[in-house]
Image: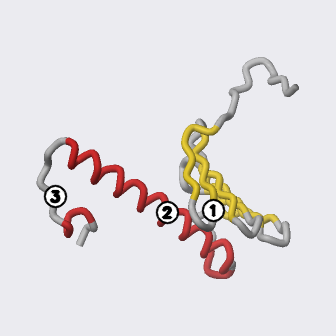
Amino acid sequence: MISKAAGEKQIYVKKWLNTKYAALFRMNTEDLHVIFVDNSMLVLSASGKRLQYINKKGEFRSYNLEVDSLSKDKGAKKRYTYALEAIEKVWKKKNTKEAIKRGENLELGKILNI
């Protein structure tokens, strides 16, 4: 049994998404945890400014996205991009469904931001 210290906030999964290549978890702290099928992981802070990455070899790296560039770490960049695209796809799909329920007339260009 895990006990929490007095005043410590309990952390739990608020939303989750399972894709072909990863499982994405939005925590109650608003951090995003992503576990990929190759056992690599990343955690994006709620502010979007800090990224922590563990590659498939188990090597840990931490990035301040305001300062650091992911261009030197192709694995982290690829997985970060994948996670953001998966979230964006779900967000657009959800908003499109909600707009249709409201009876709004949708144009494909508006949905895809073209």
Instruction: Report the amino acid beneath label 2.
Output: Ala
Instruction: Report the amino acid beneath label 3.
Output: Leu
- Residue lying farthest to the top in this orientation: 6
Instruction: Report the amino acid beneath label 1.
Output: Ala
Q: Quadrant of the C terminus?
A: bottom left
Q: Is residue 37 left or right of residue 79?
A: right
Q: Residue at x 84, y 68 (%)?
A: 59
- Residue placed under numbered mark 3 in the picture: 106
Q: How far from the left and from the top, in percent, is residue 72? A: 67, 81
Bin the neighbour count of mark 3 within 10 Å (Cα to Cα): few under 14, some 14-19, many 20 and up. few
Q: Quadrant of the N terminus?
A: top right
User: Which of marks 3 and 2 precedes in the sequence?
Assistant: 2
Q: Residue at x 68, y 64 (%)?
A: 36
Q: Quadrant of residue 43?
A: bottom right
Asked if labels 3 and 1 touch by Cβ distance under 8 angstroms, the answer is: no
Helix, strand or loop at label 2? It is helix
Q: Is residue 88 left or right of residue 50?
A: left
- Residue placed under numbered mark 1 in the picture: 22
Q: How far from the left and from the top, in percent, is residue 26? A: 57, 45
Helix, strand or loop at label 3? It is loop
Q: How far from the left and from the top, in percent, is residue 33? A: 65, 52
Camera sees residue 69: no
Q: Is residue 13 left or right of residue 8?
A: left
Query: Gap between marks 2 and 3, in whole Å?
Result: 22 Å
- Residue lying farthest to the right in this orientation: 1
Mark identifier at residue 86: 2
Q: Residue at x 22, y 43 (%)?
A: 101
- Residue lying farthest to the left in this orientation: 105
Camera sees residue 78: yes
Q: Quadrant of residue 56?
A: bottom right
Q: Is residue 54 left or right of residue 31?
A: right
